Image (tube, rainbow, N blue to C red):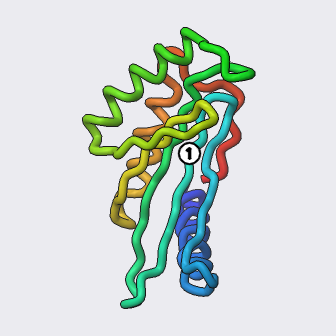
Amino acid sequence: MAGTQEARVVRLEELERKAKDSPMKESYLLISTDGAHRLGLSIRALPDGSLDYSIELLVCVLGADLEVDVPRLENAIRMTMALERLGYQRFFKEDGWVCWERELTRGDIEAEFDTLARLIEGPVGGQNKKREW
């Protein structure tokens, strides 16, 4: 378990370095993905040298070919209520996805990912996830 924590710290430091060194002053890591959810971490380097951290969760509310999918809609409603309580901002995408974003501190990243992973794995949550964190 300690090795996993050390690997996460190294990965976070790599992302921070990429944000500082990239022309756009930003880096992104996709943490988890399945057909209905995408979870990622964005780090942005500010002109004063500090870093902004934000977490995003994208939830697909429509099925294939943008068809209405009742279980996905129910899942989206359940997640909407929870994410609003957690202080996330909601943005709608044109392709049937809803994006939820929240700024956080470096120290809150792991706990927030754990919270979102539990939310995703809820009653209709994603199976066959690919996790990178």
Determine which residue is flagged by label 1. 39
Q: Residue at x 41, y 88 (%)?
A: 47
In front of the other: 25 or 65: 65
Check disc 1 and report its element: helix, strand or loop: strand
Mark count: 1
Q: Compare residues 129 and 56 and report the one nearer the observer.
A: 56
In the displayed orientation, state which residue is furthest to the front: 94
Q: Position of residue 4 (x, y in %)?
A: 59, 57
Residue that lies at the very extreme toward the bottom in this rendered image = 48
Inspect the image, locate mark 1, and give the three-letter code of the amino acid beneath it.
Leu
Q: Residue 58: where, in percent of width, then height?
A: 54, 40
Q: Relative to 126, is 71 above or below?
A: above
Residues 49 and 94: in front is: 94
Local packing at callout 1 (Cα closer than 10 Å; few below 14, some 14-19, many 20+) is many
Relative side of 112 to 32, left or right: left
- Residue at the spot x=66%, y=25% of the render? 127
Image coords of residue 88 (percent x, y): 34, 44
The vertical placement of 133 against 95, above or below, is: below
Is 19 left or right of 107, judged from the image as shown? right
